[in-house]
Amino acid sequence: MTITDEKPRRKPTWIRVKAPGSAEYSETARLMRAHSLNTVCEEAACPNIGECWAHGHATVMILGDVCTRACGFCNVATGRPRQVDPFEPENLALAVGKLGLKHVVITSVDRDDLADGGASQFVACIQQMRAHAADTTIEVLTPDFLHKDNALESVVDAKPDVFNHNVETVPRLYASVRKGARYAQSTGLLRRAKERDGSLFTKSGLMVGLGEKISEVHAVMDDLRGADVDFLTIGQYLQPTRMHLEVEEFITPEAFDGLAKVAADKGFLKVSATPLTRSSYHAGEDFQRLVAARAARQA
């Protein structure tokens, strides 16, 4: 990963994806609207939405569609959020049941305006899922709960199957990429989650192509292994609009293969590193692989 003199203007061929339009995609969209649910797939303009929704996979975004932060990479709206919807956890469980999901990813906007950062809504969603879709495994992708005492602990104690929190980028770029966030808070959150429940699978991800150096990416890997993180995802940053941070470099598939090898050698149970990898991409299949990898290591 190097910073070139001239920023790339067009996406390379390995980044381009087909526009969504299948019947299954339309049915997933209908169910989300019928149950008044938001998805990060839509709000963050994920390039994989056509593929995932065609297979009935969606990452549900709770606590509204307005974030209290303004990260330089993120397409989610920023402003003053609405009140928390008390029916959201039950609606989520009902939609998951109708979609027949084996694995669900629940994420949220940042809610710095709430005393617990929205942790109680995560807990309620997990509880409703256990009550109405007991066979579905649950992955939570949480905010950093900065200055929110006991928020992390309450979510971990609700017993999700996977606790995911993305560091997003290398520490040097936090001021522009993750305004209002702290790298040490994010790595510490992941460490504390595993300390709270050693049986919990923990997961984190970062984007590349923002001007980071390869040595910095390797250092983040070391920090995450130091926090006993099990699963690492690495994907290409894509600029959602001209108002967001520009892409500094498109990383080749071969370079992603190299990152995956380095991460595996550092001891992660599971690594997904491709240009189109996103934190929730193929999450269900990857969870099964994660379970198998832990069992093999403990055998």
Image (cartoon, helix red, strand yellow):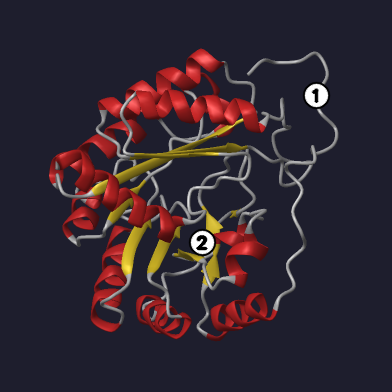
* Quadrant of the rendering where the N terminus is positioned: top right
Q: Secondary structure at mark 2?
A: loop
Residue 36 at what x, y percent from top left?
52, 80
* Quadrant of the rendering where the C terminus is positioned: top left
Residue at x-position 44% and y-position 23%:
262
The numbered mark, 2 or 1, whose residue comes first in the sequence reads 1
Q: Secondary structure at mark 1?
A: loop
Note whether 27 is above or below 213 in the view shown. Answer: below
Residue 42 seen by the camera? no
Residue at image mark 2? 81
**Image mark for residue 192:** none
Residue 206 at what x, y percent from top left?
50, 35
Residue at image mark 1? 7
Residue at x-position 24% and y-position 81%:
131
State which quadrant residue 222 falls in. top left
Residue 11 at what x, y percent from top left?
80, 39
- Sort mark 1 into few (<14), some (14-19) or many (20+) by Cα contacts within 10 Å: few
Horizontal placement of 290 versus 100: left or right?
left
Residue 146 at what x, y percent from top left?
34, 41
Q: CA distance from mark 2 to mark 1?
A: 35 Å
Note whether 20 is above or below 67 in the view shown. Answer: below
Q: Nearer the viewer, residue 274 or 9?
A: 274
Residue at x-position 51% and y-position 18%:
172
**Contact between labelled residues 1 and 2, with CB atoms less than 8 Å apart:** no
